[in-house]
Amino acid sequence: MAEFTHIDANGNPTMVDVGGKQISRRLAKARSIVVVDDEILAQLQHDEIHTRKGPVFQTAIIAGVMAAKRTGELIPLCHPLGLENCQVSISVNVQKEIVIECTASLTGKTGVEMEALTGASVAALTIYDMCKAFSHNIIIKETRLIEKTGGKRDFKLEAR
């Protein structure tokens, strides 16, 4: 049976000791899906929504990268990492949902899942913040890991 990694033998919170781990190439991809109403989607022009605050998707991309780089400051017990790459992409799918994907990578002793999840989450929150003037009928319905490589085991979300 798997055990929680951030709990010591006495049941206290602890940072995982990665000192003995092997260095490997680590990559993680996470996705957040944001559902907005037709009033917001009507603002979409040339793959971007423009507001008085600026271009929504471009701002969300920058926010997502910035957040991924600061994950160790935001999530207790998460190691501060020097990401080697972080990419955030935003598109609108056929269901008219805004799909954010964040991919983070490095060569190191610990994974980057939390960085990818944080980047996707903050990008989604940025879209909410920038679009709420049009409508508060915005749902951040899903944030999940979709792929991870490196470390003990790889993961890839099964296609639905």
Image: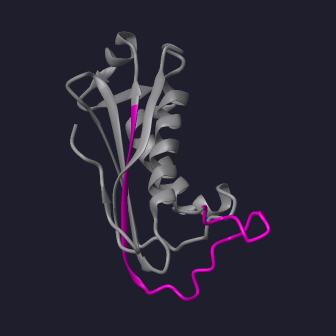
Q: Percent x, y for residue 62?
A: 46, 50
Residue at 23% over, 30% down:
93
Residue at 49% over, 74% down:
110
Can the viewer see residue 52? no
- Find the residue positioned furthest to the top: 39
Image quadrant of residue 71? bottom right
**Magenta region, residue range:** 4-33
Residue at 40% over, 75% down:
151
In the displayed structure image, the side of residue 44 where residue 159 appears, left or right: left
In the displayed structure image, the side of residue 76 where residue 151 appears, left or right: left
Q: Is residue 143 above or below residue 77?
A: above
Q: Percent x, y for residue 8?
A: 72, 70
Residue 20 lies in magenta, yes or no? yes
Q: Is residue 100 above or below residue 11?
A: above
Magenta stretch prevailing secondary structure? loop
In the displayed structure image, the side of residue 73 where residue 156 appears, left or right: left
Residue at 34% over, 11% down:
38
Can the viewer see residue 148? yes
Q: Is residue 122 above or below residue 3?
A: above
